Image: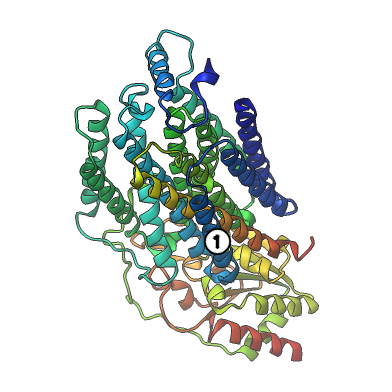
Amino acid sequence: MDNIINFGYLVAITFFVMGIKKLGRVKTAKQGNTLAAWGMFFAIVLTVVNMSIVTWDQVIGFVFAGAAIGVYASRTVAMTGMPQLVALFNGFGGLASALVAVSYFFQNFSNPTSAVVDLGGSGSMVVVFITILIGAVTLTGSYIAFAKLDGRMNGSPIVFKGQHFLNAVIFIAILGFIVMTSSGSYPIDPSNLYIFIGLTLILGVAITIPIGGADMPVVIALLNSYSGMAASAAGFILLMDGNIGGTILIVSGALVGASGLILTNIMCVAMNRSLFSVMLGGFGQEGGTAAEGGEQIQYKPVGSEESAMIFEAAEKVVIVPGYGMAVAQAQHNVRELTEELEKKGVNVQFAIHPVAGRMPGHMNVLLAEANVPYEKLIEMDDINPQFPETDVVLVIGANDVVNPGAQTDPNSPIAGMPVLEVWKSKTVIVNKRGRGVGYAGIENELFGKDNTLMLFGDGKKMIIELTNELKEL
Amino acid sequence: MINLFLHPRTPYPDEVSEVTSHVHEVASNAGESMLLDPMMLGFYLLVLGSFIGFELITKVPPTLHTPLMSGSNAISGISIVGALLAMVLPPGSDIAKWLALSAVLLATINVVGGFMVTDRMLQMFNRKGK
């Protein structure tokens, strides 16, 4: 029986691996998700079948409650709320792993002869604390990410003097604690545990708050990775306690942890940040606000009628979507605009910057929702060389990703970040609600360039107007 | 041998202490014998799992990054297995029980919500039927 269960976990892992593999191609992605879900279900069934739990009804009750909440949340939240919802779930996952660790702590505490403490010497309690560390950081970090994404918290980075020092101190205290418990010389009782938990929760906050909105996609990917690592760490606890279930936690957690790190790295490369500085929290933004104002930017406003005429005369058009489009929920209107343009023989493509939006792939999901064929979505590196041959670029709700300041101003908070070089095209039309700054809080030189026209107004409204004007031409 | 060492968690009747003491013996011989130390096994799994993770993800196009993150987030809810196993408890540890139950609740939300959100995102890709 034991061997069957052990083998069953291996099968579940296979489902996860194949599921993720299928998730990597659009045609098979949905199957992949379903496959992984079945793997999870199988793993849970295996676990439950093999145990004799005394309090069955409570467990079932909590599982049903959890499932109900999960279903409700995933069904009712709007697409624009997806990034923050994923952040929230992520936090829950980290918390769950941490709670498992704390549970083991108390089990051990009330039963000192259990294998957790004695097995393999002093190593095991360390695993408990490491799990709590990773889980707690994931929890609070994810909550901050959630708050910033949901607008409950200001998107600007919270930076103060001595912040890096403070973070380092907290981290060293945590490490010190772990080292001391491993040597067995420091008595571990609940009060110490609470202090430790407190420190780790604070650390999670401390390394997330210095991160400004534009860098959110990076943070989300990183926290995703952490929640996987937390699960792995919990798996170590189980394994060292003699529980074969630990294996599936370690492997699955490693899959998730590694995938999150890869995505984070992709984001970092796209933002020209180092992974290390992201993990430490804050990107050296001391004095990072670029020269604000400086020269007054001369806007050249244009109306939808005139814009439509410019579009009609164009052969090649590139649309750059940004978070503003998501907020205005204009993606469907953008698709209509695209269709109208194509009727007139215009070639339309979309330039997708890796960190446009609030999550990796955010723009892709929105445009997919609007039925824009995904072949039209071109990555930054592939579309940048095409701008000189492009007649018109339409920027909708994007700002920092088309800011030439990233290339020209070394003091800019986005200095060094690769951007979409839209100013190299013949004409740029920027749609913005007003004259405000972008998420990174800086002015955009693009708006003042000779070949840039500003189409002020709400995204959805202006796109609809533009489309109607085109229909009449 | 390994089978004896790694067995699914059972409740704490007194005969478990027999297994535990055997495990002590075995663990202390770990350095000299060929027995598989759980920590080492764990590291094998961690490293190999990470390699698989790296390989799988590098091939995913940016278009699918959002569903990928959501899906992998759901998979990190595997901690539900850990929470369930933690429910097999020694007597007199009420705190431990409630902690484990809370973990079950949270992990379930993570799992169910995560897979459903991912599915919802992917619905949108399939509508085009390309």
To which quarter of the image does residue A8 belong? top right
Looking at the rendered image, the quarter that the C terminus of chain A falls into is: bottom right
Q: Secondary structure at mark 1?
A: helix
Report the front residue among A23 and A199.
A199
At label 1, the amino acid type is Gly
Residue A290: x %, y % from top left = 33, 67
Residue B28, compared with residue A219, is above or below; it is above
Q: Is residue B119 left or right of residue A78?
A: right
Residue A267 in view: no
Residue A91 in view: yes
Q: How is the image coloured?
A: rainbow
Circle 1 crowding by C-alpha within 10 Å: few under 14, some 14–19, many from 20: many
The residue lying at 29 percent from left, 36 percent from top is: A109
The residue lying at 63 percent from left, 27 percent from top is: A1
The residue lying at 54 percent from left, 81 percent from top is: A453
Q: Is residue B113 left or right of residue A311?
A: left
Residue A306: x %, y % from top left = 63, 89
Residue A329: x %, y % from top left = 59, 77
Report the front residue among A446 and B64.
B64
Kindly identify which residue carries mark 1: A70
Residue A271: x %, y % from top left = 46, 55
Query: So how many labels did they put on this image?
Result: 1
Chain ID, mark 1: A
